[in-house]
Amino acid sequence: MKRPLEIKAEVNTMETLVTLTSAFQGIASAHLARIRSEVLKSNAFFEDLWQVYSKIRVDKIFHFGRRADEENIIDKELYILITAEGGFSGDVDIRIIRLMIETYDPAKHDIIVIGRHGVAQLEQRGIKYKKYYPLPVSDLHTNVTPLVKDISQYKSSTVFYPKYLTLSSQKITSIQLSAVVQEMGLGVKVNDDVITGINYIFEPSVHDVVSHLERSMLFISISQFILDSKLAQYASRFRAMSVANHTAIESRDDYKSQYSRAVRGIKDERLKETINSLRKIRAKI
């Protein structure tokens, strides 16, 4: 049986774990709230852009910010994998790689990875990637300009990422960028104002304005994918810290019970020794 001092040390250790897991749980919760707020803001900005874009674009095809006469488009599909930067993402990144491998063909696809952990997973499988970008550290003001430039060079692009559903549920999904921009636009209520070259001046041209709007909406879409991926990661961490916190509390309470029993056992032993000593003294008398 452990001594009371040894058990007391275990109680103190569990108290520390309870405090740490509770703190990490609070940090993850704060990140979740902040990212949700950013997503709502970007949705409002996207709606404003779509109001203008839907009235001046010359066709129904999303051109990824490219001019109609632009050449040298890479005749491949670009796969974009959004993964964690570190190795504490559970099996989420492995599931992303598995989903990507189901349709991956080196002759038809190029890969760009966001997040160091995704790079490690690809290298383990001997799969080559074209570029790597670190996952943005900040949850605010994410700069995806280099990635948008890469996307505009390809015929089409598909994003693989963990989609946040609830705190206890994240879904690994893939979606084509042109489709997601169109879907986001379908939810926007467009007013009846007319935007043409008659009542507006476009500089340098209407095609350049449309291309700029498409790049802006692509910027928003990519940023939201990254934010959604971070939401899923923080939700996973929040859940993990909740489980760890619950386990630490149970262990702490168990050690407290053991400590109380150990202290009571020592007192009982001393009481027995005292009673036995008194009996011996009385027997001698």
Image (cartoon, grey):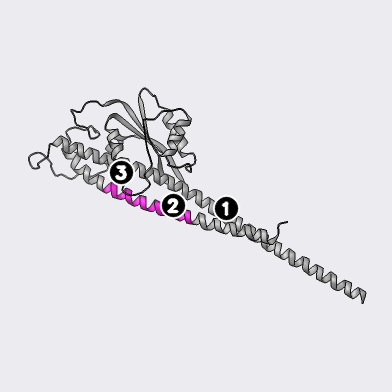
Q: Is 3 left or right of 247, judged from the image as shown? A: right
Residue 145 drawn at (x, y percent): 28, 40
Does residue 82 appear in this view?
A: yes
Residue placed under numbered mark 2 in the picture: 28
**Disc 1 and disc 3: Cα gap in Å?**
39 Å
Magenta highlight range: 23-44
Residue 79 drawn at (x, y percent): 36, 31
Q: Is 21 left or right of 140, judged from the image as shown? A: right
Residue 234 drawn at (x, y percent): 43, 48
For residue 143, the mark is: 3
**Disc 2 and disc 3: Cα gap in Å?**
22 Å
Residue placed under numbered mark 1 in the picture: 247
Label 3 element class: loop
For residue 75, the mark is: none
Q: Nearer the viewer, mark 2 or mark 3?
A: 3
Instruction: Quadrant for the C terminus, please.
Output: bottom right
Residue occupying the point 21% across, 26% down: 71
Residue 203 drawn at (x, y percent): 12, 39
Q: Amino acid at mark 2?
A: Ala
Q: Compare marks 1 and 3 and give the one earlier in the sequence.
A: 3
Label 2 element class: helix
Furthest residue in direction right, as rendered: 284
Label 1 element class: helix
Residue occupying the point 81% across, 68% down: 273
Q: Amino acid at mark 1?
A: Thr
> Label 3: how many residues lie within 10 Å, few (<14), some (14-19) or many (20+)?
few
**Location of residue 47 by image quarter:** top left
Q: Compare marks 1 and 2 and give the one earlier in the sequence.
A: 2
> Label 1: how many residues lie within 10 Å, few (<14), some (14-19) or many (20+)?
some
